Image (cartoon, rainbow, N blue to C red):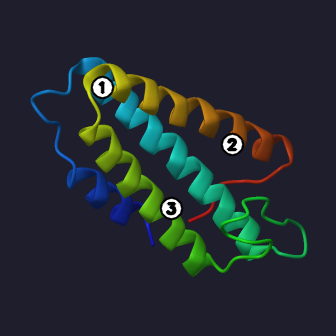
Amino acid sequence: MTMRFLILLLLAFPAHAEWDATDRWLGTAAVTTLAFDWGQTRTTAKQPNLYYETNPILGRHPSTGQVDAYFVTCIIGTMLIADWLAPANRKLFLGTVTALEIVVTQRNRQLGIKIAF
C-alpha cells in the first residue's frame, strides 16, 4: 500500500452536499490522523525486535499486510459511518476519532516510532 492508494481512497468519498465545511474538515483530520497511525504501525510491523503492537485486533506482531488491511478497513468504515450519521453526531464521531488518533500517534512519536510506507 502506498500513499497513492490512500489518496485514491479519499477520492472515493466525495464531499456530500449535506456535509458542511466543519464536517469536511473533521473528515480530513480523521483520515489524516488514521494515516499517520497507519504509517507508524507499519514501522512497528517492520521492526518487531524493537516494537510491539498494543491494538488487540492486530495482535502483538502483525504483518504489514495485516496492518494495511486493518487501516484501509478503518478509513473506509470511518467515512461510511460518518456519512450515515446525522450532522451533529457526525461532528462528534469524527472529532472523537481525530482526538483518539492524536493521542495514539503522539504516544507512538514519544516512543520514537516513525511513519513509514
Q: Amino acid at mark 1?
A: Asp
| Residue 51: x %, y % from top left | 85, 65
User: Separation of disc 2 and disc 3 at Cα?
Assistant: 14 Å
* Labelled disc at residue 92: none
Q: Earlier in the sequence, mark 1 or mark 3?
A: 1
Q: Is residue 53 left or right of residue 72?
A: right
User: 72 or 110: nearer the eye?
Assistant: 72
- Where does residue 114 sit, x and y in percent of width and height? 72, 53
Horizontal relation, residue 52 to residue 90: left or right: right
Which residue corresponds to the image point at 83% horizontal and 75% vertical from the top-left?
Answer: 48
Which amino acid type is shown beneath numbered disc 3? Phe
Label 1 vs label 2: CA separation? Answer: 22 Å
- Sequence-wise first label, 2 or 3: 3
| Extreme residue in the right direction | 49
Labels 1 & 3 near each other (Cβ < 8 A): no
Residue 97 x/y as whole percent: 52, 37
The residue labelled by disc 2 is: 105
Answer with the quarter of the image where residue 5 lies. Answer: bottom left
Compared with residue 89, is residue 33 higher up or lower down, i.e. above or below?
Answer: below
Pointer 1 or 2: first along the chain: 1
Q: Which residue lies under the disc numbered 1?
A: 23
Q: Please give the residue where the numbered disc 3 appears in the rendered image.
A: 71
